[in-house]
Image (cartoon, rainbow, N blue to C red):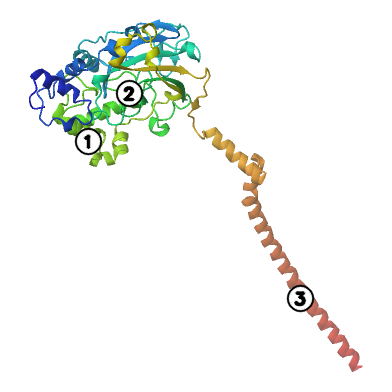
Amino acid sequence: MKHITKNEEYLWDGVSQTCVLSSLFFHEEKLLANTSDLIKAMSIAAPTFNETLQKCYWRNKFYNCGEIFDSVLTDEGICFSFNSLKSEHYRTELYNARKKDFIGFELNNVKDLDWNLENGFNQQADEKTFPVRVIGPGDKESLVVSLRDRREDEEQLCRNSVRGFKVILHTPGEDPQVWKNFINVPLDQSVSLTIKPKIMTSEDLRHYSPERRQCYYQNERYLRYFKVYTQANCESEWLANMTLSECGCVKFSMPRNSSHPICGYHKLTCVDSVMYTSKEWTINYEKYLNAYNCLPTCISIEYKAELEHQVPINYAQIEESDEGFSNKDNSSYRVTKITLKFKEDNFNGLKRSELYSMSDFIANCGGLLGLFMGVSILSLVELVYFSTLRLLTNLKNRRITQQERNKRNTWADSGHLNILNGQTKNVKHRYSQ
């Protein structure tokens, strides 16, 4: 590695951005550090679009892969995205930076959108509306992609234990983040994946504050680089801000403007520490994340994939008309075929709602009182009456009754003595006679 040309050094700095163990091979600061030439070098070193994507079928119809796939930047390098908004969900700062960095790739794919994350498609939208959609489940509405990888490009140390292609599923307006979650599709395999969406709605919570309901609607949270708010987009901005603060630059795939430097080779350790390791601030990850207010969206769509079947590819039976490459290429390339489809045409969504409204609270209180006490509105009046007026009246009547009783007892005792005195006199008088 000591005797390399300037061109090899140029390409190495681009490749080192996505090689996990690149520090084992090279330890010098590179000339491309902190410049956008890193992405240009990566574009040159990466496999070309036509080398990777061979044949594409969408809804049982053959397409040139370039018609339905776009090139995008991810933390794993240059990837290819189907049905994803690109320039439509970038704000001006990020759009200009991406257009400047992405030499050889077009970002001017602005299309008329009849879709948004909260309301879905307009009622007037037809089958050709972008982003495209399926009509039903099954193979006839599936996306089939034939991919291949050059055998000489395989590097065992760079990718750790991951072999093959990485697939991620996300909503059209979301910037893909491979490092957080992906599906590993092995080489030399024909894989069929069924998609199961998870839909969350929250229509009746707009009168609550975002802090109370713990989610955002699209018009409540502004992002600097993205027009569409999702928790993943918000976290991308937060991570870019943290990396810029800690390292003085941002990773090539992070959202940025043209003035933010890109972290070169000698800054990769700092970037990795921000993204993966447990520095002091990462211990309080949730605290920092909450400070940036990256709450989930109140209306969201997530996609989960299940492996339906996986079959080894028989290279001896591959024909050019079927897979898009000739038999002589099979010794140089390894092949993967991916089929993505929906399993069912109906899905049960989840609804986020308030547990108790004021009317629910009053109704439950009345119900509980009625259950345990037989209380009605008149019973509440009676309760107040018997605990106040009736009680005072009874006490007053008892006092009056006691006073009258005491008077009668006094009169009775006085009359008895007079009678006794009169009888005594009569007796004495009779005795004296």
Which image quarter is the N terminus in? top left
Asked if the residue under mark 1 is in contact with the one under mark 2, i.e. CB atoms within 8 Å, the reply is no
What residue is disc 1 on? 273
Q: Residues within 10 Å of mark 3 (few under 14, many from 20)?
A: few
Name the spot of residue 394 as percent of width and height, x first: 67, 56
Q: Which residue is drawn at 84% across and 86% down?
A: 424
Which image quarter is the C terminus in? bottom right
Q: Nearer the viewer, residue 251 or 238?
A: 251
Query: Which label lies toward us, 3 or 1?
Result: 1
Q: Is residue 112 left or right of 2 when viewed as pictured?
A: right
Q: Which residue is drawn at 46% across and 17% down?
A: 341
Q: Which amino acid does label 1 sit on?
A: Ser
**Nearer the N terminus, badge 2 or badge 3?**
2
What residue is disc 2 on? 164
What residue is disc 3 on? 413
Q: Residue furthest front?
A: 316
Cα distance in 3D space between marks 3 and 1: 104 Å
From the viewer's perspective, is residue 130 above or below residue 388?
above
Cα distance in 3D space between marks 2 and 3: 116 Å
Q: How crowded is mark 1: few (under 14 residues within 10 Å), some or many (20 or more)?
A: some
Name the spot of residue 413 as percent of width and height, x first: 76, 75
Q: What residue type is labelled 2?
A: Gly
